[in-house]
Image (spheres, rainbow, N blue to C red):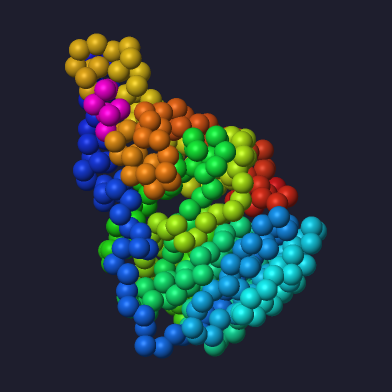
C-alpha cells in the first residue's frame, strides 16, 4: 500500500509537470522564434563585463563583443575586479570596430557580492547616455548579430529586460551527462513561457541580459540587489515590476568556460543551490524529500515494485524521460540520457546538500577566493 501511494503521488506530480506547468519542458521560447523587425533607429548601448582572473577566456568574450555588427553606437566597459592573471591585458589585445574601455575596479565594498560591485561600477561609468545596458559575463562569446537581435526584441516589445540563456559548453563526458539537465531544472523552476507573460514570475539568465537603463534606475539600480547570490533571477524579478521582460534559449551566445569533470560542475551548482532555498534547513529537507519522490521513486518502483505501484512508477519514469527530450535535442545529445535523469537528479541533490554544508562552514557562495553567501565568513 505504501509503495502504491508513493508511486501514485509521483505519477500525479509528473502529470502535473508535463501538462500543467507552463509547458516548460518543450523548450519553445527561443530567440529564433517570432523574430521582430528592426527598429527605425538603433539606440545607444553599452556592454558591461565584470571580470576577475579570466585571462583564459576574456579574449574570446571581448573579441566577440567588439565584432558585433550593431548599426548604432556601441561601446564596451570591462570592469577588472582585482585580477592577478593579466585579464585586462588580454582584453586590450582584442580588436574590433567597437571601443573598449578597461576600468580598474575599486576594492570590494562591504555588503556587496564581488560581481555585482563590479557591475555597479560599470553602470555608473556608462553614464546616462545609453538606452540599454548589455550585462554579459567574461566567459560568454556571442555571434556577431546577437546585440541586433536583443535590441530589436527589446524595442519592439517595450521590454525592460531581454535575457538569453547562453548555450553551455557540452563537450566532456561530465558536461554531456550533467549540463542539459542544468537548463532543464532551471526551466522547471522558472518556466520561460510564464516568465514572458505579464503576470508571470521574473527571472533571467546572467550570461546575457539587455537592460533598459531607465528601468534599472527606477528599480533602485544594482544596489537594490547588491547581496544577491543568484543575481540574474533577482534582477529579473526586480525589473519585471518595471515592465515586461523576455527570457529565451539561444545558440547565439555560448559559454566558453570548461567544466571538464563532475567536481567542477558540482562546485558551480553548490555555489548557489542553498541560496535558492533561502538558506532554510526546512526547505533543504523538503527539497531532498521532494527530489527523492519525484526522481528516485519511479525507477525504484519500476525495477523492484509490483502491480499498480510498478505501473505507476514506470509511467512516471517514462514521462520524466520524455519531458527531457526537447532539451537533449537542443544540446544535440542522445535521447537515452532521458532514462538516466534519476541518476542526474541524484547528483544535483548531492550538490544541494553540499551547498548547505559549505554555507554552515562559512564557505557558501565561494567564487574566485571569496565566500559570498549570506552569513558566510
Query: Where residue 21 sits: x, y (%)?
Result: 26, 47
- Is residue 120 shown left or right of residue 215? right
Residue drawn at (66%, 57%) of the image: 57
Vertical placement of 83 versus 95: above or below? above
Residue drawn at (41%, 32%) of the image: 337
> Would you say the magenta stretch is mainly helix, strand or loop?
helix
Vertical placement of 309 versus 350: above or below? above
Vertical placement of 56 versus 216: above or below? above
Find residue 301 and report its image quarter: top left
Q: Which residues are magenta?
A: 313-319
Query: Where residue 46 sits: x, y (%)?
Result: 56, 78
Q: The N terminus lies in which quarter of the figure?
A: top left
> Quick check: can you spot residue 198?
yes
Find residue 108 and report its image quarter: bottom right
53 part of magenta stretch: no
Residue drawn at (59%, 84%) of the image: 127
Amino acid at each position: 500500500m505504501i509503495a502504491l501511494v508513493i508511486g501514485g503521488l509521483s505519477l500525479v506530480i509528473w502529470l502535473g509537470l508535463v501538462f500543467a506547468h507552463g509547458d516548460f519542458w518543450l523548450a519553445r521560447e527561443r530567440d529564433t522564434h517570432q523574430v521582430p523587425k528592426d527598429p527605425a533607429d538603433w539606440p545607444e548601448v553599452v556592454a558591461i563585463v565584470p571580470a576577475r582572473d579570466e585571462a583564459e577566456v576574456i579574449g574570446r568574450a571581448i573579441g566577440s563583443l567588439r565584432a558585433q555588427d550593431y548599426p548604432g553606437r556601441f561601446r564596451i566597459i570591462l570592469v577588472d575586479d582585482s585580477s592577478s592573471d593579466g585579464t585586462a591585458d588580454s582584453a586590450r589585445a582584442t580588436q574590433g570596430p567597437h571601443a573598449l574601455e578597461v576600468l580598474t575596479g575599486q576594492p570590494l565594498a562591504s555588503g556587496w557580492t564581488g560581481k555585482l560591485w563590479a557591475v555597479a561600477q560599470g553602470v555608473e561609468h556608462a553614464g546616462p547616455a545609453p538606452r540599454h545596458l548589455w550585462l554579459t559575463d567574461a566567459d560568454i562569446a556571442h555571434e556577431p548579430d546577437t546585440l541586433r537581435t536583443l535590441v530589436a526584441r527589446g524595442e519592439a516589445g517595450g521590454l525592460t529586460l531581454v535575457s538569453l540563456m547562453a548555450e553551455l559548453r557540452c563537450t566532456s563526458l561530465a558536461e554531456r551527462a550533467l549540463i542539459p539537465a542544468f537548463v532543464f531544472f532551471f526551466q522547471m523552476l522558472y518556466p520561460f513561457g510564464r516568465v514572458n507573460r505579464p503576470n508571470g514570475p521574473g527571472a533571467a539568465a546572467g550570461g546575457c541580459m539587455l537592460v533598459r537603463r531607465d528601468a534599472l534606475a527606477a528599480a533602485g539600480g544594482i544596489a537594490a540587489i547588491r547581496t544577491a547570490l543568484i543575481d540574474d533571477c533577482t534582477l529579473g524579478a526586480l525589473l519585471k515590476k518595471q515592465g515586461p521582460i523576455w527570457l529565451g534559449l539561444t545558440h547565439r551566445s555560448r559559454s566558453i568556460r570548461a567544466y571538464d569533470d563532475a567536481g567542477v560542475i558540482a562546485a558551480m551548482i553548490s555555489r548557489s543551490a542553498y541560496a535558492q532555498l533561502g538558506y532554510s534547513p526546512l526547505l533543504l529537507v523538503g527539497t531532498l524529500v521532494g527530489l527523492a519522490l519525484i526522481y528516485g521513486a519511479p525507477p525504484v518502483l519500476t525495477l523492484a515494485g509490483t502491480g499498480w505501484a510498478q505501473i505507476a512508477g514506470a509511467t512516471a519514469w517514462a514521462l520524466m524521460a520524455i519531458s527531457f527530450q526537447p532539451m537533449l535535442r537542443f544540446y544535440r545529445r542522445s535521447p537515452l540520457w532521458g532514462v538516466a535523469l534519476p541518476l542526474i537528479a541524484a547528483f544535483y541533490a548531492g550538490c544541494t546538500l553540499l551547498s548547505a554544508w559549505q554555507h554552515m562552514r562559512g564557505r557558501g557562495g565561494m567564487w574566485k577566493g571569496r565566500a559570498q553567501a549570506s552569513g558566510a565568513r
